Amino acid sequence: MKTRRFGRTGHMSTVAIFGAAAFWEVTQAEADASMERVIAAGVNHIDVAPSYGVAEARLGPWMAKERKRFFLGCKTMERTKAGAAAELRRSLERLRVDSFDLCQIHAVTRLAELGHLLVRQPEVTAFVELKRSSIERFGIDTLLTLVRRSLKPALAQCILISYSLEALLAARRQGWSRIGAVIDQWDEHGQELIAKISPQFLFCDVDGLPREGQLQIDGTKLVIFEVADPRVALALAARGVDFIETFAVGEMLQELSRHAASP
């Protein structure tokens, strides 16, 4: 079966992903027959959630023996740190696995809901991206007004980011306090518009970086995205990078923990 890159995870997922909501109220025998067909078809990605009836319990016997075959994504409807952690641990137990490849907050359908979630977790900072498609649809001024209104309860916790330097400049002039500019190539950081925006954060694709040399910018935190290799993360830190963005969270944490513990 054909595969496509699954966002920034780097995983090459099959074009057909198995949505385990299909196991909402099936018997184990029915689930077994379906999983045999899933494997025979070459599907390598499963999406499941505790809200999908008995799906996790039906998948458990298969994940116990076939975990390496699948990219496994799970979700939570909980909106607190403790609640989400507890629910995800229960999902791990039902699925008979030690980890997920992707965990998501389920059914966040409006930006205003994100704002209310942030208020409950004051230690959390959110990077909120103005997408080019949204800018084209609504226009810069209207979009900024909508985003500000929706995130009003938690504006202090939000950092506005975008590839659109024009939108970020407008945001700065409107009084947005924390801003992050996004670029694909390192040599773009010297643009006049970026100097005018004076962003607190600069995001750059790892593939757009020079091979060597320091990467620090005075007064700006540097974030490199599309980083999947812990060795690359450590090398970037040595070059002055402040943050990395990755979807390989589990693998990254494990490797960096081992590195920190080594003499």
Image: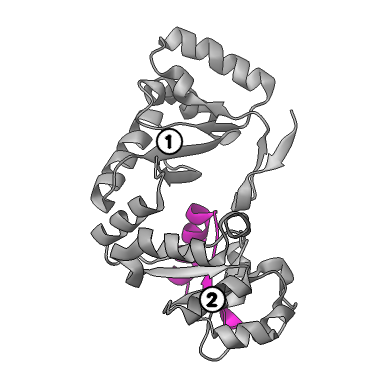
**Label 1: which residue?**
97
Residue 144: percent from left, percent from top: 48, 66
Is residue 76 found inside the magenta-colored segment of the image? Answer: no
Residue placed at 71% from the left, 40% from the top? 4
* Residue at 30% across, 47% down: 85
Identity of the amino acid at label 1? Val
Give the image quarter of residue 130. Answer: bottom right
Residue 102: % across, % down: 49, 45
Q: Is residue 85 above or below residue 2?
A: below
Inspect this view and state whether residue 160 appears: yes
Answer above or below: position of 220 versus 14: below
Of the two numbered discs 1 and 2 in the rendering, the one whose residue sits closer to the viewer: 2
Q: Residues within 10 Å of mark 1 (few under 14, many from 20)?
A: some
Which residues make up the magenta segment?
237-263
Question: Which numbered circle lies on residue 170?
Answer: 2
- The residue under the point 58% across, 81% down is 238
Could you say which quadrant of the image residue 14 lies in? top right
Q: How crowded is mark 2: few (under 14 residues within 10 Å), some or many (20 or more)?
A: some
Residue toward you, 76 or 56: 76
Q: Does the magenta stretch include residue 247?
A: yes
Whole-number angstrom distance, CA of label 1 to CA of label 2: 47 Å
What SS does tag 1 mark? Answer: loop
**Picture layout, residue 140 above or below residue 111:** below
> Dot 2 lies on which element?
helix
**Residue 223 visible in this rendered orientation of the protein:** no
Q: Which mark is residue 89?
A: none
Looking at the rendered image, the quarter that the N terminus falls into is: top right
Closer to the chain start, of discs 1 and 2, is 1
- Amino acid under label 2? Ala
